[in-house]
Amino acid sequence: MRRLRIVLLFALLLALIPAPALAFGGRVPDGQVVFGEDFTLAAGEILDGDLVVFGGDVTLEEGSEVNGDVVVWGGTVDVNGTVDGNLAALGGDVHLGASALITGDLVTMGGEIQREEGARVEGQEVTGVGRGWAFPVIIPLPGGARRIPIPSGPYTHWNGLPGLLLHLLLRGIRLVLLVFLMAGLSGLVVVLWPQPAARVGETALQALLPSLGVGLLTVVVAGVVVLGLIASLCLSPLALLVILAAGVAGLFGWTALGILVGERVVPALTSRPVSPFWSAALGGALLIFITELLDLIPCVGWIGGFLVTCVGVGAVVLTRFGTVAYPVAVTETPG
């Protein structure tokens, strides 16, 4: 689930700003995000940066080179050149020609791998996304996109005390960033939309099981719809709208639950009046902090955060983004 959240996040942030694939002197500008089109890297061309393609096929001709990761959604991948990084294909087949070379990991989900004799993969080959693989987030910056590997789960190839300390440091930095992000979002929401957030939080508290059920159904349906739209290619732009709606609903649900937590925790800590902003910020920070700690427990893992997400999304759906109370009061018309 953590891997899915990361994938949806960079899809939401980046796919709305596709970049044209133009070559300059045999080199392609770094950080290519291609939407709804096929991408071909001709023989002798070099792409400096990551390649992300939504709803299109990717062809890397013999003699071509990608100095970064390649991520393809809903399309086939034909590799006859070199990928100096990881290759991930979601919802499509991968063909490795005799001259193909992948220096990193090969990750596939929902597709098959066809390999010719001579093709080489120097990293791991994973069917489905495992917890030991850092999925890249492509962030557009002036001068081109930049890749930031997001660590997720235990890194089995980090051995010894230095590796353990580095892993703990990265997890700690990630946790601090998430805590501050959720605290800020919760405080912002309670200031801008106090009543809708209150309705969502109260619905999640008073109608926990209906919220969980509706949220789970919404997440499943949204995932199926997105995959179906991406696979259909011509309808793939609609997939972005579904991702956007699901992302907004998820964030609003999380912040509403964080506000609810803050309203319950602050009175237990102090009898002095506290600004709604700081109360919501504390609640949002505590909520994400607890779910991240639960993620460290092997028997629990991502389940805690997934359940919170489902409850929040369900409450958002039941209250129509907090615009109506649940259950909706029905006014009887005098006969």
Image (cartoon, grey):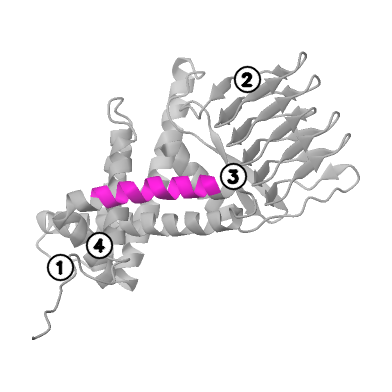
Asked whether the viewer can see residue 309, the reply is: no
Q: Mark 1 highlights which residue?
A: 273
**Circle 3 residue:** 231
Prevailing secondary structure of the magenta residues: helix
Q: Give the range drawn in magenta.
A: 212-228
User: Residue at the spot x=29%, y=72% of the render?
Assistant: 323
- Seen in the picture, residue 194 relative to 61 is either above or below; the reply is below
> Mark on residue 123?
2
Q: Which amino acid does label 2 sit on?
A: Gly
Mark 1 residue crowding within 10 angstroms, few (<14) / some (14–19) / many (20+): few
Residue 225 falls inside the magenta stretch: yes
Q: Residue at x 18, y 51 (%)?
A: 208
For the N terminus, give its image quadrant.
top left
**Disc with the residue nearer the chain's start (3 vs 4):** 4
The first of marks 1 and 3 along the sequence is 3
The foreground one among 6 and 185 is 6
Q: Residue furthest right?
A: 25
Mark nearest the camera among 4 and 2 is 4
Q: Element under label 2?
A: loop
Give, as a three-letter code, the residue at label 1: Pro
Disc 2 crowd rating (10 Å Cα; few below 14, some 14-19, many 20+) is some
Residue beneath label 4, please? Answer: 200
Q: Which of label 1 and label 2 is nearer to you?
A: 2
Q: What element carries label 4?
A: helix
Q: Quarter holding the C terminus?
A: bottom left
